[in-house]
Amino acid sequence: MAKKNSSLLLFFLLLNSLPNSDALPEYSRPPPRPAIFIGPTRSESEPEQVHISLVGKDHMRVTWITSHKHEKSIVEYGTSPGNYDKSSMTGERMSYRYFFYNSGEIHHITFGPLGPNTTYYYRCGGNGPEFSFKTPPSTFPIEFAIVGDLGQTEWTASTLEHIGAKDYDVLLLPGDLSYADTQQPLWDSFGRLVEPYASKRPWMVTHGNHEIETFPIIYRHGFKAYNSRWLMPYQESGSTSNLYYSFDVAGCHVIMLGSYVDFDAQSDQYMWLQADLAKVDRVVTPWIFVLVHVPWYNSNLAHKVEGESMRKSMEELLYNAQVDVVFAGHVHAYERFTRVYDNKADPCGPIYMTIGDGGNREGLAMIFENPSPSISMFREASFGHGRLKVYNETHAHWSWHRNNEANNTFMADELWLKSFGSSKSCLPHEKFQEMKTHIKDEL
């Protein structure tokens, strides 16, 4: 299978050479580092591309792929190495076809309940290597690693090494994972690249434009590989689509929105977001964070105003619900805005951050507006990642870490945050209170 998939890579490279409306010559980028392609290193019966994600209050989902179609879908786990006193076969398995490419068997198994802040050892499919992960805490403090537009280049490997060098609890990724762009073997390579990290801590992701992978007539709806490989807990949050969902972890409510799904006021996503925000209890989850791929605020010349229609549709919902921070990707640079609403500084609006600087093959977006808008507080075109440490119900610390040439990381930007959930200075908007009451009555 490995030899077959490698030979298919040429076909997909040719397919990907078709004109791409996203690749407009509107800014120049420096030469990126070389791309990485990782082939299989295990037998066809052993699990590979292992990654985990949160499901509900105290469960985890582990996803893996086997070349053989008839391997068992079972996870054995325990709290000491080699001692698996529990097991689960709850979940599903699937495969998909994309032109001449046939995926391996993709296993999604949910298991638990699990204890908070506890290390578990596990094995997938009844054979193969042992993995381990640590569950997030049930209460503060909690630390998120946040990075977008990863891809698979030497810069990506550098970013992942920097992330893995310091402990964290959950990784959040606002879209553009593998940069496969219809070259399906690159999805397998990406899964192998991130496995050492994504098998140890839960990765919670949303999609970007590089996950769409539509093709006229044949694959009109897109997201075939993404939805098959990166199953997120959308049903647990009342969503009907894997392309947008939410989850709670240790006092934080995290919302993953879909930039490439309908978002107007009559759309399923809009109505789901409205209901989801109305159900948030700021006593239980005083912090609300939102991730979306295309930034709503952006002073870089790359992808200028692409997020404007979604901002106009949904920004008022986030503002009225007192969302604390909105993270985006898409633009290959880092930028932090002040608290904003409707293009103006507003102490009761969310902070907006762009963090699409994970290491993609397209390079950095180097050109910003000049002069800088007054609402833009910090911006830099460098690869790196962010850290959000939520200390308690009231305060959190944000830091952005630049990848330096010398294979180390440098904290180039930081900020202390105070949650709206604990603040009396910005009370929930009257419209939002009415909406909460209406939705509770319906429930």
Image (cartoon, rainbow, N blue to C red):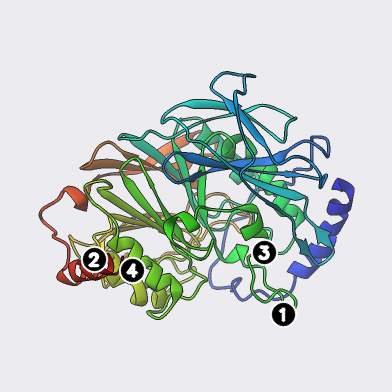
The amino acid type of the residue labelled 3 equals Lys
* Distance from Cα at disc 1 to Cα at disc 2: 42 Å
- The reply to whether residue 337 is in sight is yes
184 to the left or right of 253: right
Q: Name the residue under label 2.
A: 436
What residue is shown with label 3?
224
For the residue carrying disc 2, how many other residues have a C-alpha within 10 Å: few (<14), some (14-19), or many (20+)? many
Q: Which marked residue is nearer to the observer: mark 4 or mark 2?
A: 2
Q: Which amino acid does label 2 sit on?
A: Lys
N-terminal label among 3 and 1: 1
Q: In this view, does 275 lie above or below 77?
A: below
**Mark sitting earlier along the chain (4/3):** 3
**Could you tell me how far apart the alpha carbons at marks 3 and 1 are, in whole angstroms?**
14 Å
371 horizontally vs 328: left or right: left
Name the residue rendered at 30%, 35% in the picture: 140
Q: Mark 1 points at which residue?
A: 216
- Name the front one of labels 3 and 1: 3
Given contact means CB atoms under 8 Å apart, are the residues at marks 3 and 2 in contact?
no
Query: Whole-percent x and y of residue 327?
Result: 39, 56
Q: Say whether disc 1 or disc 2 marks the residue closer to the N-terminus.
A: 1
Q: What residue type is labelled 4?
A: Gln
Q: Mark 4 = which residue? A: 274
Q: What element carries label 1?
A: loop
